[in-house]
Image (cartoon, helix red, strand yellow):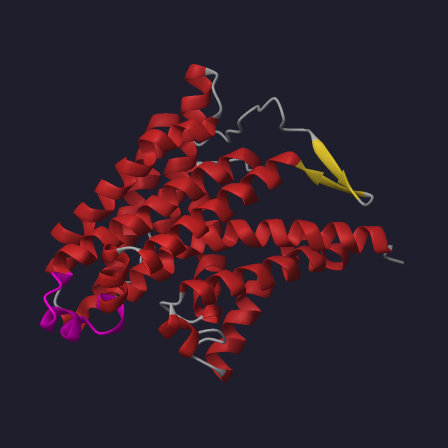
Amino acid sequence: MVSGALLFQSLILGILLGGLYALLAAGLTLYFGIMRVVMLAHSAFIILSAYLAWRFATLTGLDPLLSLVVTVPLFFLIGFAIQRWLLSRLRPATMTMMSVLLTIAIALIIEGLLGMAFTGTQRRINLPYGSSSVNLFGAAIPVVQIVSFALAALSLAALYLLLKKTRFGRALRATIQHKEAAQLVGIDTAKVSGYGFGLGLATAAVGGAALSLQATIYPSLHWHWIGPLMAIIVVGGLGSIPGAALAALLLGIMRVMLEIPMGPTWAQTIFYLALFLTLMVRPQGFFGGRLAQRF
């Protein structure tokens, strides 16, 4: 018999996990919205950021989140360079298929470089608050998950304000909604797309640092994440950041709830079941359409 306290704790942990999923998936859906690119290297960059956070914490003894001062602008520049000098050179007719092959190659290069630099040994950051927890109405909530969720919420709020309240955000949304029309009103869509792609990769830097707080990392870990993240953006509606956030919260809660009767391995299958169901019933996603247009 499952107790009410266990269900409440699972609900809170599911919300916290969903917040992290939302941040990790935000960049992935941004790429698709800008260029219709399936960026399979996104999760590899997340793991690269986690490694940089781990290395920073190991060398300096400081909190790994401080590594974001370097990794966020670095990843932004890398994303801008990938879009301007690699992806934009692909022909539009074969963009989606060729971008899959190109980004898989980038993911394999990152995995190989991480293996060469740090070997395949699993790494984990020893934080002073790593084993601490907060008691909330009888539920023990790990502090690292609260910190990760807070970082994800702040990042998504900053991304939302950037896209809604700034001139660049309006130009980016116009480029996403109708590229040709945006060009007619004087928007340099090539440059805006590059900045948007860099912004997407900057979210990977933040997500990787958040992930490093609570996960054991190894070079091939990105293959474990890309499936759930792809499922989230498909269920949320490709190109819709609010849709991805809602889908991430929903699937995060369902996954943690299913861990009670099924265990963590089988609970992971909820992402693939949701993906198959979405493709069969509503291929445009459950939270896309008008919600994506408003954003």
Magenta residue check for 167 = no
Left or right: 249 as drawn, with respect to 23: right
Residue 160 pos. (x, y %): 40, 56
Quarter of the image where the C terminus is located: bottom left
Quarter of the image where the N terminus is located: bottom right
Query: At x 46% / y 58%, what residue is drawn?
Result: 229
Nearer to us in this view, 33 or 124: 33
Tally the numbered discs: 0
Residue 64 pos. (x, y %): 46, 27
Can you say whether 76 is above or below 277 in the image? Answer: above
Query: At x 45% / y 64%, what residue is drawn?
Result: 242
Left or right: 172 as drawn, with respect to 190: right
Query: At x 27% / y 36%, what residue is drawn?
Result: 74
Can you say whether 278 is above or below 157 in the image? Answer: below
Residue 205 pos. (x, y %): 37, 40
Left or right: 274 as drawn, with respect to 288: right
Residue 134 pos. (x, y %): 72, 36
Magenta residue check for 182 = yes
Left or right: 86 as drawn, with respect to 289: left
Q: Main secondary structure of the magenta part?
A: helix
Q: Write the start and end of the magenta stretch as one range.
A: 175-189
Nearer to us in this view, 222 or 243: 243
Extreme bottom residue here? 281
Residue 143 in sight from this viewpoint: yes
